[in-house]
Image (cartoon, rainbow, N blue to C red):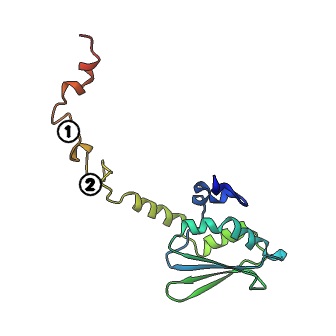
Amino acid sequence: MPFMKGRAPIRRTLEYLSSGKLVLKDKVKIFSVNYNTYGDHHDGARDFVFWNIPQVQYKNPQVQVVTFKNMTPSPFVRCYFEDGRDMLIDVDSKNRLEIEEHLMRVVGKTKEQLHAEARLAESKDNPANFGYGCNRHCICEIPGQVPCPGTVPLPDRMRGKHIFAPK
């Protein structure tokens, strides 16, 4: 498999990408990370870019993610909002888990927001959904399906007592 080549190919699997925790708020339009490829105080930012940026890109397809290498003396994250404001977040001498946790608190959606959005996305008017709380009560209401046996009796060839009963 060609996608399993290179450094740490686990980063390209769907399971790994979808396990990311950082979902940015809707107001964030550009997410940039500035770091150097050398220096001890840039280790956390380098690890964050290597391990977490693919997850951030996968979880936030509407956000532009940019990385700048070797352009700054200290590592930082800058978020640009839709109203023109921007926010600088210092990640100097932090490890990647601390960076992720801090970003989740500052520019990430809360767990309650994520659960509410998942619930709304689940209950959309999908014609394949039927039952309590949906547009259709039963699958028999869809054209081409077998009607409910309570209203129209099933043909004998579809009833188990005529097929499996001894004659």
Where disc 2 sits, the SS reads loop
Query: Who is closer to the viewer here, 81 or 57?
Result: 57
The image shows residue 53, relative to residue 115, as above or below, that is below
In the rendered image, which residue does mark 2 sit on?
135
**What's the amino acid at mark 1?**
Pro
Picture coordinates of residue 124, whole percent (x, y): 35, 60
Query: Who is closer to the viewer here, 129 or 5?
Result: 5
The image shows residue 39, relative to residue 18, as above or below, that is below
In the rendered image, which residue does mark 1 sit on?
147
Q: Do the residues labelled 1 and 2 touch (CB within 8 Å)?
A: no
Residue 15 occupies quadrant: bottom right
Picture coordinates of residue 96, whole percent (x, y): 72, 68
Residue visible at 55% across and 66% down in the picture: 59
Q: How crowded is mark 2: few (under 14 residues within 10 Å), some or many (20 or more)?
A: few
* Cα distance between the residues tagged 1 and 2: 17 Å
Q: Which of marks 1 and 2 is nearer the N terminus?
A: 2
Residue 83 falls left or right of residue 158: right
Picture coordinates of residue 132, whole percent (x, y): 30, 49
Residue 32 falls left or right of residue 112: right
Residue visible at 60% across and 60% down in the picture: 17
**Residue 132 visible in image:** yes
